[in-house]
Image (spheres, rainbow, N blue to C red):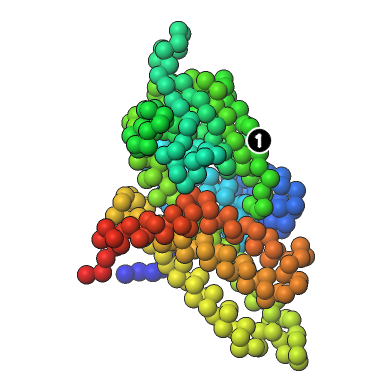
């Protein structure tokens, strides 16, 4: 059992760490303040060949896999979860295409992501169907209109889509069966292109944190989607779950990186801040809080790297879900605790925009909600124990 990163991944970690220090850290506050998309960081990631980390080499990627992307995101998230989200969006919408797409779809849509010439987003949630995805109302019906030669007509609104304004294409889930049905085989995945008639961006959200990558609505009004843009099979909703399962370590990496950045910053602060004739770092109570957080960070990293290792082997089906969900749950809840402790260690200063601690505090909360809330993850872990997928004898 080898816990060291391979030489290739270790080199990737060092190069991204340097890029994050040089390019991401100086921009983090400005991105949060203005809310403007950081095109310069996207270009820096493109030049560093980070946009195709999780994509196979035959589609223009580097083949570093989910573990490679996890390592990169951890480094970037130390300074900006917005920048980390930009990297995450190279995998979330492409996941279903990688898992179940045909060769034509992969060659049409993946190389542009790897090269940075295109961007994509993922449409699953709706106003009344967040965690309850079976309650979605977006509808796809066979297109029988003259001149359309089959295919589907999509109508509905997707919400809370990260990168909705920047995307050139979307992975969208809609009901192809009875709209009132809660059966999973009533839902299908499609690739929808931004340029098509009837596709538009609706309202964009005003967010508490993770500003700079727009989140908002995708509106579909009688959009014709060719039959060849169905991902996998009609009624293949299981694909959505497989895609999200495989994403757990990537989201977890955002939490680990944020926790690391917050703890390192707070530690340097208490080492230099004097009170009662000592530095704050000399007080045992402070040391214990730092130590407990360090333990949690290392535990989260082990859970996350194992989850990424499993996902890279295609092990994101039902029996592996508890291990994947553990990583997402523990790492994102850790981000909330770490950012909260960092604010507390800095005291009043930590609450001010003079320090990045309040930014981390706002950003962290998003991580416990997106791509399956903490409560959803706990339910999946418990189901794994009750179903004996997670058992110890």
Q: Which residue is mark 1?
A: 203
Given residues 125 and 93, the one toward you in this image is: 125
- Toward the top, the furthest residue is 146
- Which quarter of the rendered picture does the C terminus lie within? bottom left
Q: Is residue 248 above or below residue 341?
A: above
Question: In the image, is residue 294 above or below residue 219?
Answer: below
Residue at 67%, 74% (x, y): give it.
344
Q: Give the side of residue 36 with respect to residue 217, left or right.
A: right
Q: Residue furthest front?
A: 180
Quarter of the image with the N terminus is: bottom left
Q: Position of residue 228 (x, y in %)?
A: 39, 24
The x, y position of residue 356, in whole percent, is 70, 64
Q: Is residue 17 visible?
A: no
Extreme-left residue of the structure: 393
Residue drawn at (43%, 16%) of the image: 143
Residue appearing at x 37%, y 37% in the figure: 182
Quadrant for residue 8, please give it. Answer: bottom left
Q: Is residue 37 visible?
A: yes
The residue located at (44%, 38%) in the rendering is 135
Height in image: 125 above or below 210? above
**Disc 1 residue crowd, few under 14, some 14–19, many 20+, Cα 10 Å:** few
Residue 388 horizontal/vertical position (percent)? 25, 61
Q: Which of 134/331 is in front?
A: 134
Splitting the image into 4 quarters, where does residue 103 fall?
top left
Quarter of the image for residue 291 reads bottom right
* Spot occupied by residue 71 in the image (x, y as percentages of width and height): 49, 59
Q: Is residue 312 left or right of residue 224?
A: left
The image shows a total of numbered marks equal to 1
Label 1's element? strand
Nearer the observer, 382 or 53: 382
């Amino acid at each position: 059992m080898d816990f060291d990163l391979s030489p290739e991944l270790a080199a990737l970690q060092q190069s991204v760490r340097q890029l994050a220090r040089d390019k991401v850290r100086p921009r983090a506050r400005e991105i949060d303040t203005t809310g403007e998309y950081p095109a310069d960081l996207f270009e820096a990631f493109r030049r560093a060949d980070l946009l195709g980390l999780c994509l196979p080499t035959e589609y223009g990627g580097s083949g570093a896999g989910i573990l490679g992307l996890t390592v990169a995101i951890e480094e970037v998230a130390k300074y900006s979860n917005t920048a980390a989200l930009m990297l995450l969006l190279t995998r979330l919408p492409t996941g279903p295409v990688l898992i179940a797409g045909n060769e034509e779809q992969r060659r049409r849509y993946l190389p542009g992501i790897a090269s940075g010439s295109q961007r994509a987003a993922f449409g699953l949630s709706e106003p009344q169907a967040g965690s309850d995805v079976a309650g979605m109302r977006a509808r796809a019906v066979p297109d029988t209109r003259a001149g359309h030669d089959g295919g589907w007509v999509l109508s509905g609104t997707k919400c809370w889509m990260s990168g909705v304004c920047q995307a050139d294409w979307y992975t969208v889930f809609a009901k192809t069966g009875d709209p009132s049905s809660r059966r999973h085989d009533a839902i299908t995945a499609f690739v929808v292109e931004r340029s098509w008639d009837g596709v538009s961006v609706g309202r964009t959200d005003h967010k508490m944190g993770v500003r700079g990558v727009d989140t908002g609505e995708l509106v579909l009004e009688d959009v014709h989607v060719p039959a060849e843009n169905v991902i996998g099979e009609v009624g293949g909703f299981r694909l959505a779950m497989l895609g999200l399962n495989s994403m757990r370590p990537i989201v977890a990496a955002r939490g680990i990186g944020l926790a690391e950045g917050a703890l390192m910053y707070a530690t340097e602060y208490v080492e230099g801040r004097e009170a009662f004739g000592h530095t704050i770092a000399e007080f045992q109570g402070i040391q214990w809080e730092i130590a407990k957080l360090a333990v949690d960070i290392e535990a989260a990293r082990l859970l996350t790297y194992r989850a990424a290792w499993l996902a890279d082997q295609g092990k994101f089906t039902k029996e592996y879900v508890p291990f994947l969900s553990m990583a997402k749950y523990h790492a994102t809840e850790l981000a909330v605790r770490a950012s909260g402790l960092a604010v507390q260690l800095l005291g009043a200063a930590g609450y001010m925009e003079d320090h990045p601690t309040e930014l981390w505090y706002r950003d962290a909360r998003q991580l416990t909600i997106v791509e399956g809330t903490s409560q959803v993850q706990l339910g999946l872990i418990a189901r794994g124990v009750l179903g004996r997928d997670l058992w110890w004898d």
